[in-house]
Each structure stands twice: as C-alpha cells, then as structure tokens.
C-alpha cells in the first residue's frame, strides 16, 4: 500500500499490531516448523539460517532491484547503486537525491532506470515533508554507466505520485494507486525517455462496474511475455494482454475478496485518522489486500502476496494459470507467525526458488520446484531485522535491512550473524 504521508513502520505503530507468539521456535541452528498450536506434525522439519556474506550501509534503504552486477536501491529521499561483483565486499558507488519525497520504488530495464516519488512523507521528527508538485511522479535516468545516473525526465502524477511501476522494453507501466477512487494503470511509451507519452489507461471499474469501490485500487504490476500482471487489492489479481500496449485487454481475473463489491465510503487519509472505520478495516486487513502479483518464468503459476496492517498477517497465494480462463489456487504460503507485521511483501520468483521478504518476519527462501507444495529451505531473521524486498543474484539472496542498508545472504557461505550496520544506515 502507498505510504505517501508516513513510513511503513510509523503506520504500523499508529494503527497498532496484534502480538502473538510464533508457531515455532528460532535458534542459532535455524527455525523449527510445526503446527499452529505448537503440536509437532508429520511435516515438522528444521529450516536452516541463511548466512550473512556481505552488507552495505544505506540510510533509508527499502525496495531494491538487480541488473547485472549492480543493485539499485530506493532510499526514501533518493536512490543508491551498489557494485556487487564481489558480494563479500559490495561497494556503494552512488548515493543521491532524486526529485520529490517518499521514494519507495525503483526499476531498471537496459540503460533506463525509473524511480517513483510520492506527494509527502513523515520525517523522523514527526513533521510531514511535502513535495513540490513538479517533483511528484516517476523520474527516468540513463544508467548506461551505473556509477553515474543521468536525469532524463519526470512523468508528473498528481496529486499523490506513484508507489509502484514496471519497465518492459519501450514501455513503462505505472500504478496510480491514490486517490483510491481514481486508481488506474497508466502505460507510457518511453522509447524516447526524455519525453514519455501516455498510450493507454486501464481501470478495473471500466470492465467491472460492480467493483467501483475505494477498496479496489491498483498497487503493483509485473510484465512478462506480453502479459501484464496486476495486483488490485480487494479486487484481486488481473492479467492483461499487452501485446499492443496501447490497447490492453483483460484475459484473466481471480483472488477477489468476497466483499469486494460491497459498497463502502472512504479515502486514503482515513487509514490514519479513522483506523477503526469499516473502510479502514477493509483496506488494512484480510480478506483481499493483494499487494504483489508476480509470474514464474514459464508463466504457468503466479504468486500473489497479501499486505496486512491489522489482524491476521498476510501470506503468499499461489495460482495455476496455465488455463487463463480458469485460474486455480494450488496453495498459500503462510506467514512465519501470527504477528500482524510479518506478512509477504516483495519477492523474486525463479523456476525453482522463491526469494521472499516478510517485513518483521525477515527473509525466507523456498523450493518451489512443485509450486503446489513449497518447501522452506532457509530463513534470515536476527533480532531487530526487518526486510521489505528480497531478490536473487547469482545464487545469493539480496535483501534490504529496512532503512539501514542491504545484505547479501547464502545458504552455505558466510557467517551466522546479524548485520553490523545500524538500523539508521550507519556503519556498525
């Protein structure tokens, strides 16, 4: 969900979280998986700890993406670039501001980098920092030299900017999440990234008028093989044929919340001002809350995470979409505990592995050779650690240590220890 006027951690403190003991125990040797009531089951097994190979302090670090030997990191106020040719000794080669505030999304495609900013964000002192309207939206940079990003242009998106986007070939797919009652997917032609041009817009309510409710807004998009995969919160997951990006066509929909069509009134500001309202509770808690929608490389399965702020934490739902006319849910990867702030967030999917971040639940690595039966292989969640984004890089798991930096993890190499960088991005 967009955090244009507060950080994710602040939001959780404002809204409040349910506290419960995890269904299993964590030790230096790893985590024991058992049934939710603590009774050992026939499937009980020990999950190893991922080991820390390398780390880099980056203040404000949150979402990250990888391109070649470089890691690109959104940093609330800007972005950073890390040279990761040697994961044991990664080097920060760029740390810079970008226009606007609340910079929480970054993407790279070839020599083009896109980074999104929003309308406002809460500073550490509690005051709100507002962005100049000309700085709110998606900013494009030339990264043909990753150590020297060159500004190209800004696509302005008022009033609240953009929280997520995706670059694919000569097109940018932008998620206009807020205002919730004016949410849309925008598709831009960025063949000339100095002058982006909108070629299409898609809204769920145009195809499904019964879903014209403020709990049904777009949050995330992925694009692969001429298909766009949309996460539309309570309206569920959608797949669009974008072989002609100027004319997106819906080809599949699924995972809609049972109450997605029920009328409700509300707006983004209510999430903080009236967290107990019906609208806020529907937006902040299950069912629904489809946050991320990512396909497997072969396109046969998709992975949908559920972002939650109250009540039961969200998991990652797995659907078989080999028949786009009849998607079938094959399993749900449950959160690591009953703590509200331990939910599935951003992740990487390969044909056999899921690299996933679970906020206060840390980082978890799964074998998904059989997508209907994921097997947790390893995890990383030392005391005080939190992560919102996990990616795969040459067999390593790369994840953010939220607001502090990034870590490089491995199942066999490295040390079994917590990062030495401080939670504020300072060197340890």
Image (cartoon, rainbow, N blue to C red):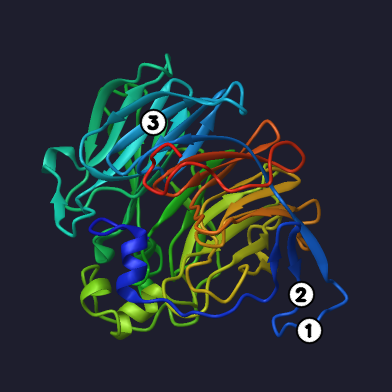
> How many dots with numbers?
3
Disc 1 to disc 2, C-alpha distance: 7 Å
Q: Quadrant of residue 261?
A: bottom left
Disc 2: which residue: 34
The Cα atoms of the two marked residues, 3 and 2, are separated by: 40 Å
* Callout 3: SS: strand
Numbered disc 2: secondary structure = loop
Residue 394 drawn at (x, y percent):
68, 30
Residue 213: which quarter of the image? Answer: bottom left
What residue appears at the point 80 percent right and 62 percent down from the top-left corner?
A: 46
- In this rendering, does residue 170 appear at all? no
The label on residue 401 is none
- The residue beneath circle 1 is 39
**Circle 1 crowding by C-alpha within 10 Å: few under 14, some 14–19, many from 20:** few
Q: Which residue, given by chain and number where applicable, does mark 3 sit on?
A: 80
Q: Is residue 210 visible?
A: yes
């Amino acid at each position: 969900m967009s955090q244009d006027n507060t950080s994710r951690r602040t939001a959780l403190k404002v809204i409040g979280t349910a506290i419960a003991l995890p269904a299993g125990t964590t030790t230096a040797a790893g985590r024991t998986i058992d049934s939710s009531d603590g009774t050992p089951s026939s499937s009980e097994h020990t999950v190893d700890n991922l080991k820390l190979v390398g780390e880099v302090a980056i203040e404000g670090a949150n979402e990250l993406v990888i391109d070649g030997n470089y890691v690109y990191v959104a940093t609330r106020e800007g972005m950073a670039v890390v040279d990761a040719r040697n994961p044991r000794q990664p080097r920060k080669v760029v740390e810079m501001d970008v226009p606007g505030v609340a910079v929480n999304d970054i993407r790279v495609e070839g020599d083009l980098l896109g980074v999104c900013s929003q309308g406002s964000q809460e500073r550490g002192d509690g005051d709100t920092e507002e962005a100049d309207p000309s700085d709110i939206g998606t900013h494009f940079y030339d990264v043909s030299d990753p150590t020297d990003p060159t500004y190209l242009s800004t696509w302005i998106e008022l009033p609240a900017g953009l929280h997520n986007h995706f670059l694919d070939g000569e097109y940018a797919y932008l998620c206009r999440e807020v205002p919730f009652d004016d949410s849309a997917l925008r598709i831009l032609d960025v063949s000339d990234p100095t002058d982006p041009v909108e070629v299409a817009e898609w809204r769920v309510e145009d195809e499904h008028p019964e879903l014209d409710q403020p709990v049904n807004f777009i949050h995330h998009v992925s694009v692969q093989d001429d298909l766009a995969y949309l996460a539309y919160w309570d309206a569920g997951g959608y797949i669009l044929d974008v072989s002609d990006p100027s004319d997106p066509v819906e080809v599949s929909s699924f995972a809609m919340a049972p109450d997605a069509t029920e009328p409700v009134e509300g707006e983004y500001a209510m999430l903080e001002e009236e967290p107990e309202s019906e609208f806020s509770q529907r937006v902040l808690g299950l069912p629904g809350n489809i946050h991320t929608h990512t396909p497997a490389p072969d396109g046969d399965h998709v992975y949908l995470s559920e972002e939650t702020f109250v009540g039961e934490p969200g998991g990652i739902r797995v659907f078989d979409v080999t028949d786009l006319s009849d998607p079938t849910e094959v399993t749900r990867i449950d959160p690591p505990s009953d703590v509200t702030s331990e939910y599935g967030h951003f992740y990487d999917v390969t044909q056999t592995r899921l690299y996933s971040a679970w906020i206060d639940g840390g980082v978890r690595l799964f074998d998904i050779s059989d997508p209907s039966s994921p097997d947790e292989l390893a995890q990383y969640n030392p005391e005080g650690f939190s992560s919102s984004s996990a990616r795969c890089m040459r067999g390593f798991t790369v994840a953010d240590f939220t607001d502090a930096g990034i870590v490089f993890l491995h199942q066999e190499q490295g040390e079994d220890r917590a990062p030495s960088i401080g939670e504020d991005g300072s060197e340890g």
